[in-house]
Amino acid sequence: MNLELIDLVTGYGPGRVVTRCSFSLMGGGITAVVGPNGAGKTTLFRTILGLLPPLGGKVLIDGLRPREYVRRHGLGYLPEVLELPDHWSGAGLLARLRAAVNGVSGTQVAEAAERSAIDFDLDRPLGELSKGMRRRVGLLLALLPPPALLLLDEPEAGLDPAQRLRVRENLRTLADGGVQVIVATHDVTGIGAIADRAFLVQRGAATAVQAGDLADPARVLALFAAEEEAS
Amino acid sequence: MTAAKMQRASVVHEIVRSWLRRNRRLAWVTAGLFVVGVVAVGMADAGGGEGGLAILVLYLPASLGLLLMSGVVSADLDSRLILIWYTKPGGLGRNLVQHYFLHQLLIGGIGLLSGGVAAALALTRGVLPADQIVRLPALAVALAVLPAAMVFAFSAWGSRRDSALALITIVAGIGLGGAVVFDAGFLRNLIMAIVFPMDALQALGGAGPSADALVANAAILAAHLVAWTLLGVAGTRWLERTLHRSL
């Protein structure tokens, strides 16, 4: 999988540009996209997904425009806000997904359930599940069929510390297996500890930073301050 | 059964389960209505036959069509589950349209069951002539799936009041059909066929239509179903293109 953002300018119209960036990601790995609230992380994701047309530049995934790539191959996406319907069960949504997408095997479902740390009964109505459990159902749906590109917007929201560690381990396994995992997060030190690359989105620009720096809270604060000063 | 068919059967089962979870009281009311209809047809000698048939062939299928299809697209939009379906191979539209057809399968099945029970009871109690009785299941299916297609169309264009809008359209259509201004003529027939083909439904359920009239009326019903389904499909395409504005 090859993701290219070429002189990308994206946002919700002139005067409301949220993000400008250029970078290229190839093969598997974990890329952290970090930044304060409202910096434009979700807007950047929506542009990569093909939901939001770029205001300038372009996004190519394996040489295709995002919408075309998604239609042909699909990708994994976990939105920051996902209010799964209370009256459905995880098993029901899984059945719906498998009916709509050909060739999702039982083995793939079992693997995705393992990667999403599903350790509860998927037959229970979603309204009876905790926020963390629902988040993991969302991750399960994002992982099917197995994607080459996985975009996760605040994947650890609502997870307890043990589940966070488990999910991080599993993301590492996915990345080592060739999946490009891009994670947008406020929790820079957590994801920073496992990211291979990182981009700081702030004041309308995405800047590459050393992923290792994200593991150190003092260094993160310094990065934010430096970006603030530069802009 | 192939794996794909098994998955679809499983989704229909899940649609029923989720609807029952969300509408437990309404499910009891519906079951009660069914029992009342059966009992009324059973008491045909006491004059309850036609009322019971109206419940089983008209009110029950039509109300289930309106209620079961409600939120078929807009609920996914509200929950943002639509973003998950968007990212799957094949595109959002295909996923939503397949979900609609699985709902229609379920709604048509319930209509057939209700109409079949009505026909069996009517036959044993001698409520209607035999040639009319055999058309009751088809009538019940039509009365279930036509309103459901209208609900889908409103839901696919993003309306959260899809069932209410479909009901208003049906009532308005019937009202328009009866209005003097449209009395007879091509315009009236066209409006009735597009908005809600009450004439064709009455002809299908009524006594003694010719074979030609039956075919013509069945064609009007099919055209109505196809037209509203296509309107809904167009809505899903529009939704896919403008999804970022809807979130």
Image (cartoon, rainbow, N blue to C red):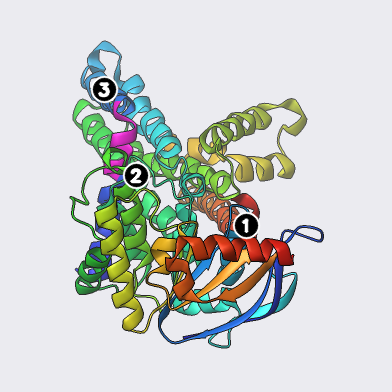
Gap in angstroms between the C-alphas marked 1 and 3: 43 Å
Say if the magenta span includes residue A93.
no
Gap in angstroms between the C-alphas marked 2 and 1: 25 Å
Q: Which mark is residue B244?
A: 1
State which quadrant residue B190 falls in.
Answer: top right
Q: Which chain carries label 3?
A: B
The magenta-colored residue range is B16-24
The amino acid at mark 1 is His
The amino acid at mark 2 is Lys
Task: Estimate how packed mark 3 is, as few (under 14), some (14 to 19) or many (20 or more) residues with alpha carbons within 10 Å.
Answer: few
Task: Estimate how packed mark 2 is, as few (under 14), some (14 to 19) or many (20 or more) residues with alpha carbons within 10 Å.
Answer: some
**N-terminal of the two: label 1 or label 3?**
3
Residue at image point 53% right, 41% down: B200
State which quadrant residue B42 falls in.
Answer: top left
Please tell me whether mark 2 or mark 1 is closer to you in this view. Answer: 2
For the residues labelled 2 and 1, say whether their Cβ atoms are less than 8 Å apart: no
Per the image, label 3 sits on a secondary structure element best described as: helix
Q: Mark 1 lies on which chain?
A: B
Q: Mark 2 lies on which chain?
A: A
The amino acid at mark 3 is Gly
Residue at image point 43% right, 78% down: A196
A179 with respect to B165 (left or right): left
Residue at image point 29% right, 72% down: A104
Task: Estimate how packed mark 1 is, as few (under 14), some (14 to 19) or many (20 or more) residues with alpha carbons within 10 Å.
Answer: some
In-front residue for pair B167/A29: A29
Residue A155 percent across, percent down from the top left: 40, 58
* Residue B146, visible in the rendered structure: yes
Q: Name the residue under label 2.
A: A131
Please tell me whether mark 1 or mark 3 is closer to you in this view. Answer: 1
Q: Name the residue under label 3.
A: B32
